[in-house]
């Protein structure tokens, strides 16, 4: 819920008018006016806290969206690097990124290919760490007969 400054001003003005009208009466009316002023102050503080909380929540959502976009960009760059590397069967390599941690899964024909895939991923800007879970599969088993 977003409360604008105009809404806050109207609320305060209404509460202050009620308070002022109560102040013209002697005795108990003055006490009522004081209590009304206190209530207006508490309402103002509550509105400010609600606005601050809403701003904080919006900032957290913005940060999450930004991180997701960065991770998507990193994943695309790693996949591109793998596809452009001669001799890499990038179609058998899956790439996932979360907060700069790139996870490589799938199969490759040799440990050298697994190492190259890791190096290519690590070279992409924004990658903080690479979790290389690639499995080396002999060419005969790469067609789907791997155990």
Image (cartoon, rainbow, N blue to C red):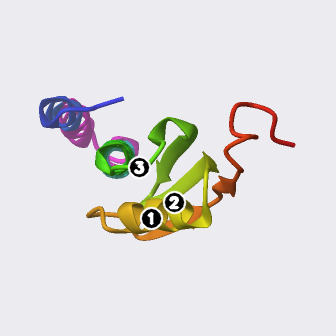
Residue 55 numbered tag: none
Observer able to see residue 53: no
Observer able to see residue 62: yes
Is 22 part of what is drawn in magenta?
yes
Disc 3 to disc 2, C-alpha distance? 8 Å
Q: Look at the numbered disc 3 and give the secondary structure of its residue.
A: loop
Residue 94 falls left or right of residue 13:
right
Disc 2 to disc 1, C-alpha distance? 5 Å
Q: Quadrant of the C terminus?
A: top right
Give the percent coordinates (x, y) of residue 58: 33, 43
Label 3 close to label 2 by CB (< 8 Å): yes
Q: How many other residues sit within 10 Å of disc 2, few (<14), some (14-19) or many (≥20)?
A: some
Q: Could you tell me how many numbered marks the image carries?
A: 3
Is residue 64 or residue 99 the one in the foreground? Answer: 99
| In front: label 3 or label 2 | 3
Residue for badge 1? 116
Residue 113 numbered tag: 2
Tell me which secondary structure the magenta stretch mostly adopts. helix
Label 2 close to label 1 by CB (< 8 Å): yes
- Tell me where the magenta segment starts and ends, as one range: 14-30
Above or below, 15 against 129 in this view is above
Q: Earlier in the sequence, mark 3 or mark 2?
A: 3
Above or below, 131 against 20 in this view is below
Residue 137 falls left or right of residue 79:
right
Give the percent coordinates (x, y) of residue 23: 23, 43
Is residue 27 or residue 144 the one in the foreground? Answer: 144
Is 96 part of what is drawn in magenta?
no
Please report the residue visible at 36 percent of the width from the left and 48 percent of the height from the top. Answer: 27
Q: Look at the numbered disc 2 and give the secondary structure of its residue.
A: helix
Is residue 92 or residue 5 the one in the foreground? Answer: 92
Residue 87 numbered tag: 3
């Amino acid at each position: 819920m977003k409360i604008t400054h105009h809404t806050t001003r109207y609320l305060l003005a209404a509460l202050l008018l009620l308070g002022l009208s109560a102040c013209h009466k002697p005795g108990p009316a003055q006490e009522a006016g004081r209590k009304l002023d206190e209530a207006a102050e508490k309402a103002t503080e509550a509105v400010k806290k609600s606005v601050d909380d809403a701003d904080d929540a919006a900032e957290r959502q913005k940060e999450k969206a930004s991180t997701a976009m960065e991770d998507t960009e990193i994943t695309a760059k790693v996949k591109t690097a793998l596809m452009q590397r001669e001799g890499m069967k990038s179609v058998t390599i899956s790439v996932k990124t979360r907060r700069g941690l790139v996870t490589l899964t799938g199969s490759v024909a040799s440990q050298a290919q697994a190492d190259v895939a890791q190096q290519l991923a690590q070279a992409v800007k924004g990658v903080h760490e690479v979790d290389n879970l690639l499995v080396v599969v002999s060419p005969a088993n790469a067609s789907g007969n791997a155990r």
